[in-house]
Amino acid sequence: MRLNEITYTNAQPVDGYGPGFFRIGGEVHDGAVLTGPTGTSAWAGYSDAQTLLALSEHVDVLFIGTGKELTHIPADLRTTLEEAGMGVEIMNSPAACRTYNVLLSEGRRVALALIPV
C-alpha cells in the first residue's frame, strides 16, 4: 500500500475527539468548537450565528457536526447561512470531522462547527 503525506495549507485538521472535547491541530479544545481557515476557537452553538457568518467570505462549505447523533439545526440558522452564500452540510460530529479532513486535504474552502459527542 502506498501512503502519501498530507499537507494542510490553510487550516488545521481534526486529529481526534472524545466525550466533550476535540483535538485539532494537536491542541485539545473542550466543548463546542469552530475551525477553518481563520483558526480554531470556542463556539457558543446554534445561537452564535454571527461567528459562523464571519466565515462567509472564506469558505464555500460549512460542516456542522450535531454531536453523537444527527439532528436538525434551527431552520432560521440554516437559512441565514445559505443566504450568506455558504453551503451548509449537517451530519453527526464524527462524520463531519472525517469529511472536513478529506476536503481540507484537497485544498477546499471548508470550515467546521462542532457540538461535542
Image (cartoon, rainbow, N blue to C red):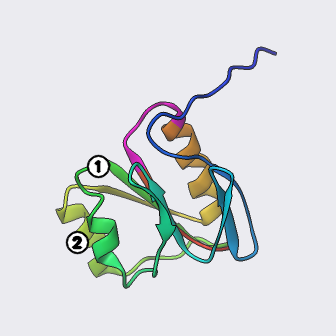
Residue at (55, 46) in percent of width and height? 12
Q: Amino acid at mark 2?
A: Thr
Question: Which portion, as a residue range, is magenta?
Answer: 105-110
Front disc: 1 or 2: 1
Q: Please tell me how crowded label 1 is: few (under 14), some (14-19), or many (20+) other residues with Cα within 10 Å.
A: some
Does residue 113 appear in this view? no
- Kind of element beneath mark 2: helix
- Kind of element beneath mark 1: loop
> Would you say residue 106 sits in the magenta stretch?
yes
Residue at (56, 38) in percent of width and height? 102
- Residue 109 x, y percent position in the rendering: 37, 42
* Principal secondary structure, stretch drawn in magenta: loop
Residue at (62, 28) in percent of width and height? 6
- The residue under label 1 is 58
In this image, 78 relative to 95: left or right? Answer: left
> Would you say residue 68 sits in the magenta stretch?
no
Asked if disc 1 and disc 2 are in contact, CB closer than 8 Å, the reply is: no
In this image, 62 relative to 117: left or right? Answer: left
Does residue 45 appear in this view? yes
